[in-house]
Image (tube, coloured by chain):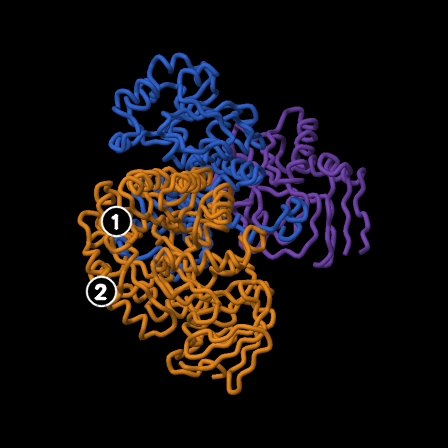
Chain colours: A purple, B orange, C blue
């Protein structure tokens, strides 16, 4: 098993800073933005991006979490998953620009589940997707709007994201 | 039928090995180094010879409930367990409360040819507890009934019980009481205790058995009668019998093999194989009845063999029938619970499972010792193996045994009923009356 | 979780997991679209041998909100009342493709017999068996106590140190039994109050204190007071002499309600005998959680059905959240 680190702490920090600027640029400012992280590490990243966006825009942007367990299409093929909490910020999502935040984009099925979940919660004006790593191999027509790093990978390789808040260190590794 | 059988090297009632020569249905010689030309030789090295076992409490289900058991299939089960005589309880359909039914049962037993089937007569008509059945007619019939019981039901009315106890003195009969105060056990499912409380099953309190036994021994004392107590199951009941015997009251008591071994803890999981009346009790009760059997307070072991069809047990506990089959496993369970624990010897086994049951049932010529001149009714038992009890060990029609999957010691290898081989080399013989049971 | 038969054998971590998932389910009930697609394509059978509109509707609502198909089978007028056995009924349901069977039966142990018999491969949820257990009731009761006490901060919490007093016919109550085990598992202190005739003969091994005096129990300032329905038929079997006497000695009247602490809650599994075991004031006071219990019942039953049906056979030891996600982003 050989693992190599593709992103170190500083790389991740730079990527998140750039994503935060890109979000503000494409939205023309902070108005109407709601960041929803997909648990577990997507939520951590959403909070980091939220802090950065708030800092750059000078105005706070709501951050929450969107658990997609109940909407997955592969529940019956796996051991029972424990859902994580969904926290929709007080302003809701109706008419807002929701930015979904995840750590790794792969087949796209999680994001499809997230779109189904959003549909049952409200009607956003627009939904965007920010991901720290895009490793390719999409099985559905889903594309990210903001990407930290494009990481070509073989299907059977494992891409792991570790963050200080949950794992004690910031790094992205790929290995087989 | 008139085979000459030479049994070599059997340990008579567990003591020294000897040879036994059987001819024309009787024991004709006992000694060492016996020979006889033309005799069928049975190598009984290592086997214990016991007088043919006598069960004072069996349910043969015929007439009326032949789906569970018939007199033929029940006789085979009995033979497989080393029994040569069984007393058949009267809760059949029609109830055995007339001379006609008991004579029919006797005839069916004779035709089957495996064991002596001695009918028990009901105490009251239809076992309803209202009017005495024609006890005298049953006593005078060809079945010569001496034991009367409403087993399944308690003779609850104290006046009826008194009259019954008095009446049977005329022909040396005995009332065998199923002690269960009905008002304290309405809807009862399991021994009233910690397990029933947790399982949400209506309790069957020990006092419902003990209060009837206490009443009955005093009645028996007052009218000067014998009394027999069926399937005694609680520590309190043992105490009452002990007290009664000290007072000189003519009471005898029986205990089932399952009450010597199993407790109500087995009901956890709601497996209805363990549902029985009286119910399995606590560990303290098991220890008390073992002690009672060892010291003679309890006189005999009786199986209460109660066959039921699969659907009566493969259902929720509440809907299940009460009862366990027990003929095939009885000796093995007594071996495990009483002999292996050092509480009784094989000679005691002969007493409590053969001699005393016959005496209480007033059946002469049964439960007789392994001496010259007596009928050749005996069982040869191998005490050494320890095997898992399976459906293959059951020889009757029903499979509701609580021991399935459990390891039990011993194995009945041969059973002879008045000289007729009914079990040969561990296998129940097909047509015992046809003659050659051995080497078929 | 293969079956949910009782709380006696429900481990603490499984109980907490169920309560936490119920929180998530409760949250979805606040949305505009209350439905989740999670159990789409699954068939859940409500096998009710005893009448119970309330519990059946609760399970039906729970199943439908998870997009499962529901089949209701009630014993009255069915083949069961004509003598069909539990075995045959069960095998018919199996042949119809039931994925889960929610069973309410008058015989204690019937759900366990159904689950262990080998007649069906479906998961079994006990919706009340005789006088034995009613696990989802105890779970919704625990959920309610926890919610009232910790509000939005309930997730992950147990009931350590919470004092719960249960009053009524303990002998015949499956709600009482299930609550005793579950509350004990969650660290609560349980007191049982009943007339002596309605306490089982031997409760020495139960993790609860037993007293015959309600006022004495109230002096201990319970955090939750749970009143159980008393069945009037018990009067005819001489468990207590009259309604009046029962109500006077063991009923929650205005006086006893006033003696309860301001933060204490009054609970009842329903249906209530207003004026008998619980006065109208108590039932309608802000401290009463009766209606919340009903709402929480749906969330708890959604959680139970989800945990029973959403995965394959549960693997011992939860898969780490990180590696789970790797499989199908």
- Nearest the camera: A80 or A97? A80
- Identify the element where label 1 is drawn: loop
State the CA–CA distance, disc 1 to disc 2.
51 Å
Chain letter for the residue marked with disc 2 in the picture = B
Q: Residue C206: x percent and y percent?
A: 50, 32
Chain letter for the residue marked with disc 1 in the picture = C
- Nearest the camera: B410 or A102? B410
Is there CB contact under 8 Å for labels 1 and 2? no
Q: Residue, x 36% and y 60% (percent of image)?
A: B58
Q: Residue B158: in sight, yes or no? A: yes
* Residue C76 - label: 1
Nearer the camera: disc 1 or disc 2: 2
Is C210 situated left or right of B251 in this image?
Answer: right
Q: Residue A97: in sight, yes or no? A: no
In the picture shown, does residue C188 fall above or below A74? above
Is B287 situated left or right of C293 in this image?
Answer: right
Q: Residue B374: x percent and y percent?
A: 43, 70
Q: Residue, x 33% and y 14% (percent of image)?
A: C254
Q: Residue, x 52% and y 39% (percent of image)?
A: C18
- Nearest the camera: A42 or B314? B314
Q: Residue B319: x percent and y percent?
A: 34, 51
- Nearest the camera: B265 or A47? B265
* Residue B141 - label: 2
């Amino acid at each position: 098993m050989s693992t190599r680190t593709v992103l170190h702490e500083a790389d991740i920090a730079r990527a998140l800073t750039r994503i935060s600027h890109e979000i503000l640029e494409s939205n023309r400012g902070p108005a109407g933005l709601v960041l929803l992280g997909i648990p577990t590490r997507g939520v951590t990243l959403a909070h980091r991006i939220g802090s950065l966006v708030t800092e750059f825009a000078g105005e706070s942007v709501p951050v929450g979490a969107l658990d997609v367990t109940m909407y997955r299409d592969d529940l019956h093929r796996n051991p029972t998953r424990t859902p994580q909490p969904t926290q929709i910020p007080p302003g809701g999502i109706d008419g807002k620009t929701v930015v979904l935040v995840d750590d790794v984009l792969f087949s796209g099925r999680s994001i499809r589940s997230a779109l189904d979940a959003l549909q049952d919660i409200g009607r956003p004006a627009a939904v965007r997707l920010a991901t720290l790593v895009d490793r390719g191999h999409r099985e559905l027509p889903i594309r990210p709007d903001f990407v930290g790093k494009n990481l070509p990978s073989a299907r059977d390789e494992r891409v792991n994201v570790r963050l200080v808040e949950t794992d004690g260190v910031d790094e992205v590794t790929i290995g087989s | 039928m008139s085979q000459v059988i030479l049994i070599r090297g059997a340990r008579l009632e567990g003591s020294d090995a000897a040879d036994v020569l059987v001819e024309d249905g009787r024991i004709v010689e006992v000694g060492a180094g016996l020979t006889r030309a033309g005799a069928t030789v049975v190598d009984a090295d290592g086997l214990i010879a016991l007088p043919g076992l006598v069960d004072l409490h069996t349910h043969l289900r015929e007439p009326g409930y032949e789906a569970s058991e018939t007199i033929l299939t029940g006789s085979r089960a009995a033979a497989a367990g080393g029994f040569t005589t069984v007393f058949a309880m009267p809760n059949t359909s029609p109830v055995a409360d007339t001379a006609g039914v008991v004579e029919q049962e006797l005839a069916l037993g004779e035709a089957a040819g495996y064991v002596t089937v001695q009918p028990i007569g009901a105490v009251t008509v239809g076992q309803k507890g209202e009017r005495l059945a024609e006890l005298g007619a049953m006593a005078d019939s060809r079945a010569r009934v001496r034991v009367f019981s409403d087993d399944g039901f308690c003779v609850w009315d104290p006046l009826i019980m008194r009259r019954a106890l008095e009446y049977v003195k005329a022909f040396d009969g005995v009332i065998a009481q199923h002690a269960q105060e009905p008002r304290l056990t309405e809807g009862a499912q399991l021994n009233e205790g910690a397990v029933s409380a947790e399982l949400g099953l209506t309790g069957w309190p020990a006092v419902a058995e003990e209060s009837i036994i206490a009443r009955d021994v005093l009645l028996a004392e007052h009218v000067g009668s014998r009394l027999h107590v069926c399937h005694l199951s609680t520590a309190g009941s043992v105490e009452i019998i002990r007290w009664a015997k000290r007072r000189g009251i003519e009471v005898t008591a029986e205990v089932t093999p399952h009450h010597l071994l199993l407790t109500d803890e087995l009901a956890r999981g709601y497996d209805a194989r363990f549902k029985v009346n009286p119910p399995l009790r606590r560990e303290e009760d098991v220890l008390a009845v073992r002690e009672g059997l060892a010291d003679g307070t309890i006189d005999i072991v009786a199986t209460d063999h109660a066959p039921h069809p699969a659907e009566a047990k493969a259902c929720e506990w509440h809907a299940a029938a009460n009862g366990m089959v027990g003929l095939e496993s009885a000796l093995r369970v007594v071996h495990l619970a009483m002999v292996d624990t050092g509480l009784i010897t094989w000679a005691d086994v002969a007493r409590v499972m053969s001699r005393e049951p016959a005496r209480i049932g007033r059946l002469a010529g049964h439960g007789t010792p392994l001496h010259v001149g007596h009928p050749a009714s005996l069982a040869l038992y191998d005490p050494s193996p320890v095997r898992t009890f399976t459906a293959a060990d059951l020889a009757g029609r029903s499979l509701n045994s609580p021991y399935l999957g459990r390891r039990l010691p011993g194995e009945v290898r041969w059973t002879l009923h008045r000289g007729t081989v009914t079990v040969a080399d561990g296998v129940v013989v097909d047509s015992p009356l046809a003659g050659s049971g051995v080497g078929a | 979780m293969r079956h949910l038969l009782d709380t006696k054998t429900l481990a603490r971590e499984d109980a907490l997991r169920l309560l936490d998932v119920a929180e998530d389910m409760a949250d979805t009930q606040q949305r505009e679209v209350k439905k989740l697609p999670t159990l789409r394509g699954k068939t859940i059978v409500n096998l009710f041998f005893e009448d119970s509109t309330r519990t059946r509707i609760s399970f039906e609502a729970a199943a439908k909100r998870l997009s499962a198909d529901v089949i209701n089978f009630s014993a009255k007028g069915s083949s069961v009342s004509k003598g069909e056995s539990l075995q045959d009924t069960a095998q018919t349901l199996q042949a119809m493709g039931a994925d889960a069977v929610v069973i309410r039966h008058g015989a204690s142990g019937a759900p366990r017999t159904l689950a262990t018999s080998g007649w069906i491969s479906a998961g079994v949820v006990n919706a009340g068996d005789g006088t034995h257990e009613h696990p989802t009731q105890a779970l919704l009761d625990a959920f309610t106590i926890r919610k009232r006490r910790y509000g939005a901060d309930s997730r992950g919490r147990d009931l350590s140190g919470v004092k719960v007093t249960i009053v009524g016919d303990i002998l015949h109550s499956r709600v009482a039994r299930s609550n005793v085990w579950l509350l004990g598992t969650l660290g609560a202190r349980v007191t049982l109050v009943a007339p002596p005739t309605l306490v089982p003969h031997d409760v020495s091994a139960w993790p609860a204190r037993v007293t015959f005096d309600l006022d004495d129990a109230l002096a201990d300032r319970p955090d939750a007071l749970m009143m159980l329905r008393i069945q009037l038929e018990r009067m005819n079997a001489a468990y207590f002499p009259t309604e009046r006497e029962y109500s006077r000695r063991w009923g929650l009247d205005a006086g006893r309600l006033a003696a309860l602490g301001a933060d204490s809650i009054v609970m009842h599994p329903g249906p209530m005998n207003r004026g008998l075991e619980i006065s109208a004031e108590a039932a309608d006071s802000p401290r009463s959680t009766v209606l919340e219990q009903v709402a929480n019942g749906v969330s708890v039953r959604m959680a139970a059905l989800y945990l029973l049906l959403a995965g394959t056979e549960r693997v011992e030891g939860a898969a780490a959240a990180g590696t789970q996600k790797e499989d199908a982003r």
